[in-house]
Image (cartoon, grey):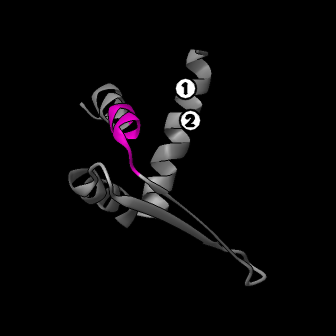
Amino acid sequence: MNPMKLMQIRGMADKFKQNHPRIPDFFNAVAKQVDEGSVIEMTLTTSEGKTLRANIRVNADDMALLREIDEAFVK
């Protein structure tokens, strides 16, 4: 990975956290609750009012990925 790009992304992520301070708390709460069989649903409402929705049921492979992400980025 390009170290300069990582620094740029880090700065953008910090700005995102400043603009949306409740999001990190939400993700931390979700991380403590998600387990195999949980359903994660995402909804987007566009500026024109169109709604897009998708969901997944968390499986064992998903849980393994989430654990790896947690270990790599959170700890």
| Towards the viewer: 32 or 47 | 32
Q: Which mark is residue 6?
A: 1
> Is 16 a magenta residue?
no
Q: As drawn, is 53 to the left or to the right of 10?
A: right
Residue 50, position as x, y percentages in the image = 74, 80
Q: In the displayed image of the protein, which residue is found farthest to the right? A: 48
Q: Residue furthest bottom?
A: 49
Question: Is the magenta region chiefly helix, strand or loop?
Answer: helix
Residues 9 and 46: in front is 46
Where is 7 relative to 26, above or below? Answer: above
Q: Please name the residue that numbered disc 2 is placed on.
A: 9
Quarter of the image where the C terminus is located:
top left
- Tell me whether the residue at label 2 lies in contact with that at label 1, contact meaning CB atoms closer than 8 angstroms: yes
Q: Residue 16 — which label?
A: none
In the picture shown, does residue 69 fall above or below 27? Answer: above
* Image location (x, y in percent) of residue 13: 49, 45
The magenta span reads 58-65
Q: Is residue 64 magenta?
A: yes
Q: Tell me the kind of residue under disc 2.
A: Ile
Numbered-mark total: 2
Question: What secondary structure is found at the residue carrying circle 2?
Answer: helix
Q: Residues within 10 Å of mark 1 (few under 14, many from 20)?
A: few
Q: Quadrant of residue 29?
A: bottom left
Say above or below: 26 vs 3.
Answer: below
The image quadrant where one finds the N terminus is top right
**Amino acid bearing label 1:** Leu
Crowding at dot 2, Cα within 10 Å, few <14 / some 14-19 / many 20+, comes out as: few
Q: Residue at x 54, y 26 (%)?
A: 6
Question: Circle 1 sits in a helix, a strand or a loop, which is it?
Answer: helix
- Could you say which quadrant of the image residue 64 lies in? top left
Left or right of 6, for residue 64: left
* Spatial separation of the CA atoms under disc 2 and disc 1: 5 Å
